[in-house]
Image (cartoon, helix red, strand yellow):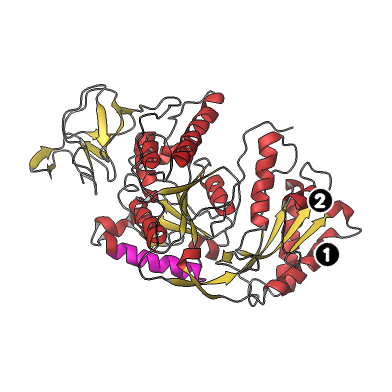
Amino acid sequence: MQINPADNVVVALQPLSVGSEIEVGGRVIRLVTDVPAGHKCAITDIAAGENVIKYGFPIGHALHAIRQGACLDHRDIGTNLSGTLDYSDVRLQGLTPPSPSGEQLTFQGYLRSDGQVGIRNEVWVIPTVGCVNGIIKQIVERTRAELGGDAIEGIDGIFDFPHNYGCSQLGDDHENTRKVLADMVHHPNAGAVLVVGLGCENNQPRAFEEFCGDYDHERVRFMVCQEVTGDEVAYGVSLLKELVQKACHDRRQPLPASRLRIGLKCGGSDGFSGITANPLLGAFSDFLCETQGGTTILTEVPEMFGAETILMERCASDELLRQTIALINNFKNYYLSHGEPCGENPSPGNKAGGISTLEEKALGCTQKSGRSAVCGVMEYGERLQHNGLNLLSAPGNDLVASTALAAAGCQLVLFTTGRGTPFGTFVPTLKVSTNTALAQRKPQWIDFNAGVLIEDQRMDETLAHFIRKVLSVASGEQTRNESAGIHEIAIFKNGVTL
């Protein structure tokens, strides 16, 4: 497959053997090496130092002369990325925030008292500090046992979310922890929340309660273990039971798809990610934002490096362009301040799947954003303010970035993968495979197979199936991570630990 007419490489859709002949643009090319599925093959001689072109953009330069018909991988291509740039040559395309048009779809969700909309009615136990992780686990396990297990009428689940932070942190790390935990307290997928503190931590429970601002005192309770006389687990169970009784009366109701807030994430990417699953998410993002008035968020800032100007050109205003430039350069400075190069990516799994440089990974990754205007740019831990496509500051790490998307207010994360992963964050994490082989090999991980896009399905047909899948999950259908009982969080850390 030649993705763009300007490309000097093609992607093998299946394993190709040395000596095989392929036809590209009316020319027949004989392969001089084997080419694994998802990997690149040169369709012309490429000189040492010459740019390798894929998606119509440079994905790096040839480290040595490459023959026509040869496979290229990370040993053959070097990154062109360096430090921060001023991006003074970026010109806006003149895109404006979308005006919804078309048939308005609905899903069955929960309308909360603060006006937010959830797609789950769960009860959460959140620790202010890692010291009480064992306590919250006991509280949840005992509550489940006393209420008859996981099948509690009206409740989609009772979950605890352990983490390592809340103490021995300074500056931005301390604030990041408080922001993410406060975002969880306010998240609409939770029908009720029990916050459990120790009492002597940096993230003082009373100060954290004040930091959370206005909240529903009937649905959010705070408990400080050092202030409890006697068995703190038994006391926590009594509080949690009260919260369950309040939340169990909530019921789903028809709500417009405009109320959906969807996170866009990829991980364990391969050479098919930018051809199948990521373009599918991009098409879905455009559909949700432009026809329904909904919201999507793209994150993984380091995986925008090399494709960032594509996003910058789509900013809906000069101010959003300024914020996007800062988003990129701030993350580059984060790398450089630790003595790390900006292009130290992709991962071993990415390379094995056919991705050679960070530019190549970024050009595939950013396709999850579709073609819509960028309507908002968010700092880490910030909650959504704008409908439409938003950009969020967070690293590429799967669980850290997915947690950040959920904390920003996403009720659901769409996660594309070519290598496969079982994880899930604290909201449903719907896995989309880039290839059929993965979907068949790991059905317990994968919710939707986008590999059909290189087999027998058109994009519009696949998109229609995918829209139905997303609305079904939003209406209560469990994702694979949910049915496996996998619910986790990870908070971004940058500074020292005391």
Horizontal and vertical percent position of residue 362: 38, 39
Relative to residue 242, is residue 265 drawn left or right?
Answer: left
Residue at the image position 41 percent from the left and 64 percent from the top: 292
Taking the magenta stretch, the answer to whether it contains residue 295 is no
Could you tell me residue 293's position as x and y percent? 44, 61
The amino acid sitting under disc 2 is Arg
Q: Is residue 349 above or below residue 441?
A: above
Question: Taking 142 as reference, is 114 left or right?
Answer: left
Disc number placed over residue 206 in the picture, else none: 2
Mark 2 surroundings within 10 Å by alpha-carbon count, few (fewer than 14), some (14 through 19), many (20 or more):
few
Q: Is disc 2 placed on a helix, strand or loop? A: helix
Q: Amino acid at mark 1?
A: Ala
- Quick check: 438 above or below 354? below
Circle 1 or circle 2, nearest the eye: 2
Comparing 111 with 12, the one in front is 111
Q: Nearer the viewer, residue 490 or 311?
A: 311
- Provide the residue designation for mark 1: 234
Give the residues in magenta: 461-479
* SS state under label 1: helix
Q: Name the residue rendered at 84%, 59% in the picture.
A: 232
Q: Is residue 92 visible?
A: yes
Q: Quadrant of residue 153?
A: bottom right
Main SS category, magenta section: helix
User: In the picture, which quadrant includes the C terminus?
Assistant: top right
